[in-house]
Amino acid sequence: MIGPAGSGKSTVAAALGRRLGWPIADGDDFHSTASIEKMSSGQPLDDDDRLPWLAAIGRWIDEQVAANRSAIVACSALRRTYREMLRGGRSGVWFACLEVRREELDRRVGRRRGHFMPVSLVADQLKVQEPLGADEPGVIVDAGQPPQAVVAAIISRLP
C-alpha cells in the first residue's frame, strides 16, 4: 500500500488485511526515533534517513515470504528507487498506489492527532513522488472514496 501521507495507507491496509485475513504492517512503525523527531520538527527525510527504513521493511517482507504468507505493508515508497528496493528480488511484491487530491491530503493530515507527520511535509512528499510506472507491478486507485470502496477496487485487481 503506497502513497503520500494522508492517502489512507494505514486505514486501507487495515481494512484490506481484515477482509483477506492477511497480516499487516505500518511503515511508520519501522522509522527510527531520529527520523520521527526530524519529521515532527517539519524537516523532510532524505535518502540517508529512508534507506535503513526501507531495508527494515524489506526484512519484514522477507519474514512473510519465508513463512509463505501473503501480507500487506503500508509504506509511502514515493520514488521508483524505493519501490525497487522493496521489490529487490521479491517477485510477489505488488503495489496498490493510493491517489488523493492535494487539498484532501492536507485536510486528512491536518486533522490527525498524535501523529508525527505535520501538514507542512505533504508538499515535500508530493514534490518527490514519482508515479507508479506501467512496468511496475500494481494498480493506481482513487483513494478519495470511502475505504471499503478502495478495498473493493484493490481486491478486484489483485493478481
Image: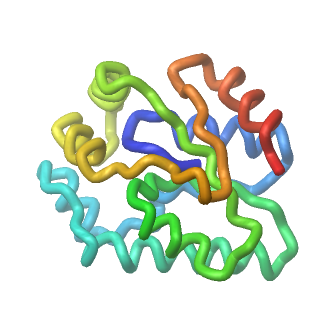
Q: In the displayed structure, does residue 42 sit left or right of residue 69?
A: left
Q: Which of the pair 106/128 is nearer the observer?
A: 128
Position of residue 154 measured from the top left corner of the image (x, y, whole percent):
73, 37
Above or below residue 104? Residue 69 is below
All told, the count of numbered labels is 0
Left or right: where 37 falls relative to 95:
left
> In which quadrant of the rendered view does residue 43 lie?
bottom left
User: Does residue 20 appear to the left or right of 78 in the view shown?
Assistant: right
* Residue 38, quarter of picture: bottom left
In the rendered image, residue 108, in percent from the top left (x then y), is placed at 37, 25
Residue 36: % across, % down: 27, 60
Q: Residue at x 66, y 72 (%)?
A: 61
Quadrant hosting residue 102:
top left
Residue nearer the viewer, 1 or 117: 1
Colour setup of the view: rainbow
Q: Residue at x 67, y 57 (%)?
A: 137
Residue 80, compared with residue 143, is above or below; it is below
Q: Position of residue 51 (x, y in %)?
A: 37, 77
Q: Is residue 134 left or right of residue 116?
A: right
Residue 75 position (above or below residue 13): below
Residue farthest to the front?
Answer: 134
Above or below, 49 relative to 41: below
Please give the name of the residue rendered at 78% of the width and 39% of the height, measured from the top-left corner: 157
